[in-house]
């Protein structure tokens, strides 16, 4: 059976990788943006970002001081026999250890008293668990999400008659409202359909899709492209100081919804759209590049 | 668009010569303070209590640092700006009361804050968000830390920095703001995009 220790240690490794090295596709998109920008100020911003990413990777130190809320997405194989309670505990232990060893900034507080737990754990509801039928492994993705971008989340229950134009308008208005706050250039995650909660979850997990991948549905893929072009013609630019690159990518996910609803959720990833994934088998762990 | 090397404490003259789009590299002491420090300072103010630090004419850095304690000594692992608009309501009173000369942050601040910067010869310096590894290299020493009961990201840290930057003068002491210029252009573009 997959041991609790292996799960815990993998979580630590994943957080270290996520906060110190940016996914290569995001770094490439930032390099491209640097070449595309014209104004001195926007180029200064992108240059600072790229230099920082290189330094963080080289020295294995966190690229951003906001090491985020430690979100964890787990898919647990049915055949692993790992108990849910053990899984939750091991992940929480991993988060505590990562906080101390890497270190991560202790960000997690009680929502009302605002008292800091000091170890980045809460009630464990920030751990999302899904079942993988028939499988004998566990897939874990850690997604340290900074507050600058997370605070710029938007949900609107549109009328079905608002249609695609209504969706576009809501997305553009939200990006304008967010302005420089989510540390643009951002990845804009959009969830369409489902119910209010499902739409937001889709928007969040859309940020975990590699930038070169389009939505498999052609119509949605062309909406992603159109929205990206429109967002970048707004002129918000890197860090909201003006420029051509406000977003690196728009990723849309959808689910069927009630005939009377059209939920649309937006969740933005800052330029430091950091995440890491591993697959844990009984005796080994695979970290895809 | 000019580049300046400045050292704290900043004089009124230092601040007034700066215009939006200028670039600044800053050295000297800065006061790291975000939501909770601002709230507590205003509470102290209300109760007429004396602050345990003197940030008169100082530079405030909107930041929650990533720190590490080793051998009983604090060390900065990463620093970078946090969203300044969260301090919109709290900032003007602090600028006025303590003669704050500069705010370092990201995302800019609202009209009230801009007005108070104009009135009190204060500027807003935009720092690139999330560049914690590079920025930490500018920190020479931690001079002081107060109010650790607020948690390390929310405590007041006094840092001695060398050539922190490049920082962009995004709001100057003459009422100019890059964010406002960008915002009005963006809103016009939005109107066109929604129409078509």
Image: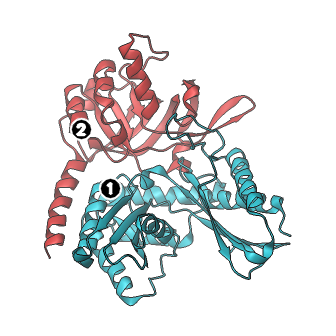
- The residue indicated by pointer 2 is B172
Colour of the chain lettered A: cyan
Q: Position of residue A207 (x, y in %)?
A: 48, 68
B35 relative to A3, above or below? above
Q: B129 and B88: which one is in front?
A: B88
The subunit letter for the residue under badge 2 reads B
The reply to whether the C-beta atoms of the residues labelled 1 and 2 are less than 8 Å apart is no
| Tags 1 and 2 on a common chain | no
Numbered badge on residue A178: 1
Please identify, in this view, whether the residue under mark 1 or under mark 2 is nearer the observer. 1
Colour of the chain lettered B: red
Q: Where is residue A175 in the image (x, y as percent from the top left)?
A: 31, 61
Image quadrant in which the N terminus of chain A is located: bottom right
- Residue at image x 48%, y 17%? B53
The subunit letter for the residue under badge 1 reads A
> In the drawing, does residue B73 fall left or right of residue A164?
right
Q: Position of residue B28 (x, y in %)?
A: 46, 29
- Residue at image x 79%, y 77%? A79
Determine whether the residue tagged by mark 1 lies in a helix, strand or loop.
Answer: helix
- Mark 1–mark 2 Cα distance, whole angstroms, equals 22 Å
Residue B191 location, quadrant? bottom left
> In the drawing, does residue A185 fall left or right of residue B153?
left
């Amino acid at each position: 059976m997959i041991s609790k220790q292996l799960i815990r240690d993998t979580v630590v490794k994943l957080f270290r990788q996520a906060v110190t090295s940016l996914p290569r596709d995001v770094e490439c998109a930032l390099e491209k943006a640097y070449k595309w920008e014209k104004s001195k100020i926007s180029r200064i911003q992108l240059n600072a970002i790229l230099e920082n990413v290189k330094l963080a990777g080289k020295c294995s130190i966190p690229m951003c001081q906001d090491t985020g809320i430690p979100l964890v997405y787990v898919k647990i194989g049915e055949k692993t026999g790992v108990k849910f309670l053990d899984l939750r505990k091991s992940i929480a232990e991993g988060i505590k250890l990562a906080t101390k060893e890497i270190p991560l900034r202790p960000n997690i507080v009680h929502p009302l008293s605002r008292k800091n737990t000091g170890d980045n754990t809460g009630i464990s509801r920030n751990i999302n668990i899904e079942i993988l039928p028939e499988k004998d492994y566990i897939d874990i993705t850690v997604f340290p999400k900074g507050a600058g971008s997370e605070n710029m989340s938007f949900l609107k229950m549109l009328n079905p008659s608002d249609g695609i134009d209504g969706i576009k308008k809501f997305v553009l208005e939200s990006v304008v409202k967010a302005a420089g706050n989510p540390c643009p250039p951002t990845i804009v995650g959009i969830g369409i359909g489902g119910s209010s909660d499902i739409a937001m979850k889709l928007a969040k997990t859309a940020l975990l899709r590699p930038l070169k991948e389009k939505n498999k549905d052609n119509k949605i893929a062309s909406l992603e492209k159109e929205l990206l072009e429109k967002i970048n013609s707004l002129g918000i630019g890197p860090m909201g100081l003006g420029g051509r690159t406000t977003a690196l990518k728009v990723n849309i996910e959808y689910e069927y919804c009630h005939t009377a609803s059209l939920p649309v959720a937006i969740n933005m990833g800052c330029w430091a759209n950091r995440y890491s994934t591993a697959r844990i088998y009984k005796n080994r762990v695979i970290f895809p590049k | 668009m000019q580049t300046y090397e400045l050292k704290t404490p900043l004089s009124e003259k230092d601040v007034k010569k700066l215009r939006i789009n200028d670039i600044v590299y800053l050295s000297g002491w800065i006061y790291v303070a975000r939501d909770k420090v601002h709230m507590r300072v205003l509470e102290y103010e209300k109760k007429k209590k004396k602050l345990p630090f003197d940030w008169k004419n100082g530079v405030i850095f909107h930041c929650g640092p990533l720190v590490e304690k080793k051998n009983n000594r604090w060390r900065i692992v990463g620093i970078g700006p946090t969203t300044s608009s969260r301090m919109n309501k709290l900032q003007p009173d602090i600028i006025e009361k303590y003669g704050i000369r500069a705010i370092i942050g990201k995302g800019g601040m609202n009209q009230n804050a801009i007005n108070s910067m104009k009135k009190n010869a204060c500027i807003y310096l935009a720092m690139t968000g999330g560049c914690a590894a590079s920025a930490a290299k500018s920190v020479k020493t931690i001079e002081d830390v107060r109010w650790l009961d607020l948690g390390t990201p929310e405590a007041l840290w006094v840092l001695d920095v060398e050539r922190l930057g490049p920082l962009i003068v995004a709001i100057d002491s003459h009422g100019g703001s890059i964010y406002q210029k960008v915002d009005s252009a963006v809103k016009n573009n939005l109107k066109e995009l929604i129409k078509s």
